[in-house]
Image (cartoon, grey):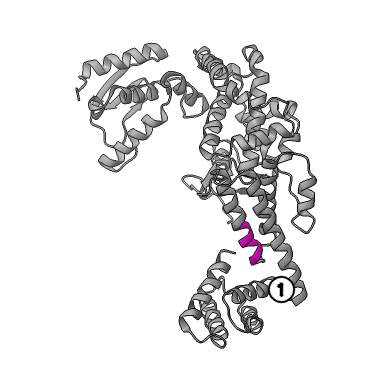
Amino acid sequence: MAVTTRAEFKERVHGWANKLGARVASISVRPMTTKWASYSTAGRLTFDALLLELREELQDYVIAHELLHVHVPNHGKLWKSLMRAHLGEHEELERELRRMASGRRGSQS
Amino acid sequence: MIVTEKLLTGYDAPVLYAMYLDKPMRDHTLLQAIARVNRPYEVDEGDGRETRKPHGFVFDFVGIFDKLEKALAFDSDEINAIVKDLGLLKVLFKNKMEQKAPPYLKLVTHGFNDKDVDDLIERFRDKGRRQEFFKEFKELEMLYEIISPDAFLRPYIDDYIGLASMYAVVTKAYTKQVYVDKAFQRKTNALVQKHVTSGPIAAVSDFVPINSETIYVIKRKHGGDDTKVINLIKSIEKIAEEESGDPFLITMADRAKEVQESYEARQTSTQEALDELFAEIKRNEKRKKEQAERGYDSLHYFVFTLLREAGVTDAEGVSANVAKSFGEHPNWRQSEADLRELRKAVTFAVYAEEDDLDRVTRIVDRLFSHLATA
C-alpha cells in the first residue's frame, strides 16, 4: 500500500480543518503508544505515525474524530450526528481501528 | 451496598439499577455519584431479545434534583452557538426523512388500528430487520433532539411521530421490559406523550391471565393473530416469572420461547405458533387439574410426571419420598453441601424402585438440570 508522506497527511488535516471550521495551532505526527491521535484545547493535534500506512478512509476517520472535538468536547449525540453527516457509516471504521490497535499493541485506540 | 464518599470514580457496574441518595451533594461530586448508576446496560440474551436498562434510578431523599436540572439544562441556543453547521445536520435529517422513512411509514395505513399493529409485528418478526429499523430511528431521534425546536422540523413532524409510534410498538412487542416513555430521549418523549394515543402500544403489551379461560379470551379478542402470538408469549413469561416456584411453568415458558424463536425465524406460521401456544395452555390446565386431584404441590407434581415419563414403577411413592427430601434440604440452591446431601437422598429414593444404576443417574441428572434452571 502506498504510504502517505507527512506533508500529504498534514495537508489532509488542514483540508478537514477548513471544512469543519476548526482552529489548528500545530500538527505533529509521531509514534504514539496508547492512542491514534489526541487534541489539546490549545489546538495542538498529535497523530500516531502509523496512520500514514493506513487507508485514507481510516485516516479521515481519525482526523475528523479529533477535529470535531474542537467544537464538541465529547462523544455525545451531537458528535455522533456530525460524524454521520461528514463520514457516513463510520462505526465500521472505528471497529477496524480498534481491532488493529488491540492486535498490534493490546491497548485501546 | 451502602457507600459514603467512596466508589465515586472508576466504579463501573452498568447493571447497577438504583441509588438512594440521602446526603446533600453538589457540582461534580453529585454528577459523579449519579453517573455510577446512570449507565445503560443492554444484554442480548441470545434468543433474539434484549434486556435493556436505558438509565438508572436515583431515589432522592434530600431534594437535590431541582438544582441538578438547573445545572444540567442547556438550551439549543447554546448548541447553535457551538455548532456552526447545524445546517448540515438538518440536511442529514431531511435526507433520512425523505429516503429512509417512507418505506417504514408505508407500513401504517390506518392510523395504528389493530390491523396496522398486527402488520407491524409480522413485518418485524425478523431480528435483523428490527435492528436495522431501531438503528435508523435512533439516528433520526438523535438528530431531532439536537435540531428541535426549529421551524425547519415542521413539515416532518407528522412522519416523525409516526416513526416514533412504530418504534414504541415494535420495541414493546419484541423487547423484554421496556418502559416506553423511557425508551425515548427527552424532546421526542414530549412529542410522543402529546400526540400518540397509548392504544397501539397497549395492544402489544396486553397480558392475559393464563388459566382455563385463556384460549376463549384470546379467540374473542379483537386484533390480529400476530398480536395474539406476542400477547400469549409475554403472558406465559409473566406468569412463569411471578410464580417462579412452579417448575412446570418454567418449562412452559421455555417452550413458549422456542415457539417465539421459530416464529421469528419463520419456521412456523402465525397460525401454527398460535396453535402450539394453545396446546401449551391446555397441557398446563390439564396438569393443574391432575395436580389438584392428587393434592401435590408443584414441585412434587413435577417430580412425579418426570418419573412417570421415565417409566419408573411406583412414581407416586418415589416422588413423595423425593419431595420429602427437598423439604428437608430447603437451602439446596445456596449450599453445596445441602445439594450434595439432597442428591444422595433423591438417588436412593429412585434407586429403591429402579435397579439400573445408569438409568437412575440419568433420571436424577435430568431432574436437577430442569430444576436448576427454574
- State which region is magenta: B247-254
Amino acid tagged 1: Asp
Q: Residue at x 69, y 49 (%)?
A: B232
Considering depth in this image, is B17 or B247 the residue closer to the camera? B247
**Quarter placement of the N terminus of chain B:** bottom right
Q: Residue at x 66, y 50 (%)?
A: B233
Considering depth in this image, is A98 or B343 the residue closer to the camera? B343
Report whether B300 appears left or right of B136: right
Tell me: residue A27, above or below residue B327. Answer: above
User: Dot 1 lies on which element?
Assistant: loop
Report whether B196 appears left or right of B24: right
User: Which residue in the protein does label 1 denote?
Assistant: B297
Residue A37 visible within the image: yes
Residue B22 visible within the image: no
On whether residue B251 falls in the magenta region, the answer is yes
Mark 1 surroundings within 10 Å by alpha-carbon count, few (fewer than 14), some (14 through 19), many (20 or more): few
**Quarter placement of the C terminus of chain B:** bottom right
Snapshot quadrant of residue B322 = bottom right
In percent of width and height, residue B140 lies at 56, 24
Q: Chain of mark 1?
A: B
Report whether B4 appears left or right of B232: left
Q: Residue at x 69, y 42 (%)?
A: B225
Considering depth in this image, is B298 or B215 the residue closer to the camera? B215
In percent of width and height, residue B295 lies at 76, 76
In percent of width and height, residue B291 lies at 73, 72
On whether residue B113 falls in the magenta region, the answer is no
Q: Residue at x 63, y 48 (%)?
A: B272
